[in-house]
Image: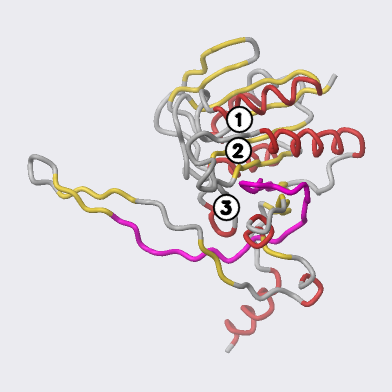
Amino acid sequence: MKTILLTNDDGFESDGLHALQEVLKSFGRVITIAPASEKSACSHSITLKMPLRMESVGEDFYKVDDGTPSDCIYISKNTIFKNFSPDLVISGINKGANMGEDITYSGTVAGAMEGVLQDIPSIAVSQVLGKENRVNTDYTFAKEVIAKIVKEIFENGFPLQKREILNINIPPKGDGRIEVTYAGHRLYGSDLHTYHSPRGERLYWLGLHPLEWGSREVEERYKSFRSDFDAVFDGSVSITPIKVDMTAYERVEQLEKWLKK
């Protein structure tokens, strides 16, 4: 029987996490270890300066107080999975996009990243929000996509190498297409809000940037592919292979020449 380990960055009460639990039960044992509270944009952080408590909230379901998604995977690998390993890690379903350079901020992607560092095939799944599903998010289509991809993995094997992740983004309104993409070029602005406390202290609240993107120059052999942004906002599910190794290999020789000048 297959064993699937779930986590997320929206917290253990998230509807997206519960949707994942529901759809994956038919594949085997589903064990969920998620943060006790929302940890959006925590990236691949782990907690070093305080102890963490893992508490059972149901059968094969745990929350980690003050824990990040990476903490959840790390703790589970060294407790529940000390003597065996899950067949798959899935992080999500995140409420909101994780595309382009936003991947580097994402706690959702980081949960999958910690999974591959522990040598477990891993997937990050996000539901991109439109105006219609921003409040009452419908995960019906996302569940269909996840079931299809997990079935393919268990029947034919994980399609990537070690320390490589499948980053999946589901469009607000999908038409059934699933498209392999590259990470797009995210455009960032400033949405910093300034306030003052009753004591006169200056406070800052970081807002959300509009989901905007630009073009990215890619090698000729990849020009038949689209970015994750272009695919999703054309109604396709975006699947982007990403990896932990961030070395810009195409710049290694150039940097060496620069140092020798």
**Element type at marker 2?**
helix
Q: Is residue 45 above or below residue 220?
A: above
The residue at which mark 3 appears reads as 103
How crowded pointer 2 is (Cα within 10 Å; few <14, some 14-19, many 20+) is rated as: many
Q: Spatial distance from mark 1 to mark 3, Cα to Cα?
A: 16 Å
Q: Amino acid at mark 3?
A: Ile
Picture quadrant of residue 48: top left
Residue 44 place in picture, x, y as percent: 54, 44
Magenta range is 167-192
Q: Image quadrant for the C terminus?
A: bottom right
Of residues 156 and 69, the one nearer the viewer is: 156
Q: Earlier in the sequence, mark 2 or mark 1?
A: 1
Which element carries disc 1, helix, strand or loop? Answer: strand
Q: Report the residue marked by disc 2.
A: 111
Mark carried by residue 85? none
Residue shown at 58% from the left, 25% from the top = 75
Please give left or right for residue 39 compared with residue 3 in the image.
left
